[in-house]
Amino acid sequence: MSTFAIGDLQGCLSPFEALLDTIGFNPDRDQLLLAGDLVNRGPDSLGTLRRVYELRDNVRVVLGNHDLHLLALAHGHARPKSKDTLAPILDAADRDTLLGWLRGQPLLVEVPEFDAVMAHAGLPPLWTLEQARQRAAEIAGVLADPQSADIFFSQMYGNDPAGWRDDLTGPTRWRVITNYFTRMRFVDRQGDLDLTTKGEADQPPAGFVPWFEHPDRLDTGCRVLFGHWAALEGRSGVAGVEALDTGCVWGGCLTALRLDDDARFRCDC
Ligand SMILES: Nc1ncnc2c1ncn2[C@@H]1O[C@H](COP(=O)(O)OP(=O)(O)OP(=O)(O)OP(=O)(O)OC[C@H]2O[C@@H](n3cnc4c(N)ncnc43)[C@H](O)[C@@H]2O)[C@@H](O)[C@H]1O
């Protein structure tokens, strides 16, 4: 049995199938960890979501910003964007099955057998593991209830407030937690987010650093598996911080990290 962590699929079904072949994935034996952004931008978001759903007994998934955008659209709280490839999901006969399953996925997955955690954008540098666990569970509870989920999606978009404060409440608090887990790249000294810069790690906005290079980053004792940041090209440069998004949808490749022996596998897109 092997466990593979795979970066952002973003609707790239053919490369996903090719990667499963390359790693010799066997559903009787192997497990997949998917770092979120299963859908959007790529050519077959519906086929990808259906395939992941089919594999659901072998898969642990975290929600990414594009997955949440899909769910917000389905709840009627977002407008489709010109580069979205989500309409076939929203029009599909099995949409309620697929979206119901997706809405049940968490922001944080713990992988105790490998002393690892996975979140789409990463682990906020100034949060303890217990704080991250509690805040992710708070959002899972919100999404589990249709009424609170509807409020969540109606208030989800936005970059403010820029950082965590202990006195945050309600939908504002939910937005900040979600922004940390699904959209974080650069943070400042007090841990606040810059949510506009998407470039390379060595070109931060003034006063900011990549979250995994924060000088006061707490040692959780866990490896961190994350996707989201294609410009990293699969390298954080920090031990135990495993960047998995290698820009499949941007003409790069799809990456799988076998946690048993740290072997990396790639399929061109
Ligand atoms: N609270 C909230 N507020 C706002 N939006 C929310 C939200 N919650 C959910 N969303 C949703 O989030 C989505 C983000 O939209 P966008 O912000 O338009 O997303 P994107 O450009 O597709 O990039 P993404 O953020 O996925 O990052 P990636 O690194 O892959 O790509 C980023 C860039 O990196 C570039 N890139 C790729 N590979 C690179 C490389 N090797 N080197 C340099 N740049 C590279 C790409 O060209 C691309 O431009 C939308 O669907 C939006 O609705």
Image (tube, rainbow, N blue to C red):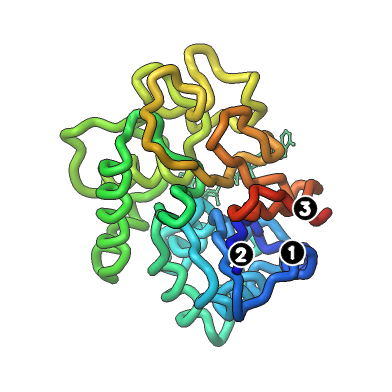
Q: Position of residue 217 (x, y in %)?
A: 40, 25
Q: Which residue is at a point 47% across and 46% down the rendered structure image?
A: 182
Q: Which residue is at a point 38% across and 46% down the rendered structure image?
A: 178
Between the residue at mark 1 and the residue at mark 3, the CA separation in whole angstroms equals 9 Å
The residue under label 2 is 2
Q: Which residue is at a point 39% across and 59% down the rendered structure image?
A: 106
The local crowd at label 1, few if under 14, some if 14 to 19, many if 20 or more residues have their Cα within 10 Å, is some
Disc 3 versus disc 2: nearer the observer: 2
Name the element at disc 3: strand
Contact (Cβ within 8 Å) of mark 3 with mark 2: no
Disc 1 versus disc 3: nearer the observer: 1
Mark 3 or mark 2: name the one nearer the start of the chain. Answer: 2
Seen from the viewer's position, the closer of residues 235 and 120 is 235
Amino acid carrying mark 2 in the image: Ser
Q: Is residue 41 above or below residue 13?
A: above
Q: Position of residue 200 (x, y in %)?
A: 66, 27
Q: Is residue 135 above or below residue 52?
A: above
Instruction: Kindly identify which numbered label has been placed on residue 23.
Output: 1
Q: Position of residue 85 (x, y in %)?
A: 66, 63
Q: Which residue is at a point 60% across and 55% down the rendered structure image?
A: 260
Between the residue at mark 3 and the residue at mark 2, the CA separation in whole angstroms equals 16 Å
Q: Is residue 53 above or below residue 148?
A: below
The residue under label 3 is 266
Seen from the viewer's position, the closer of residues 3 and 89 is 3
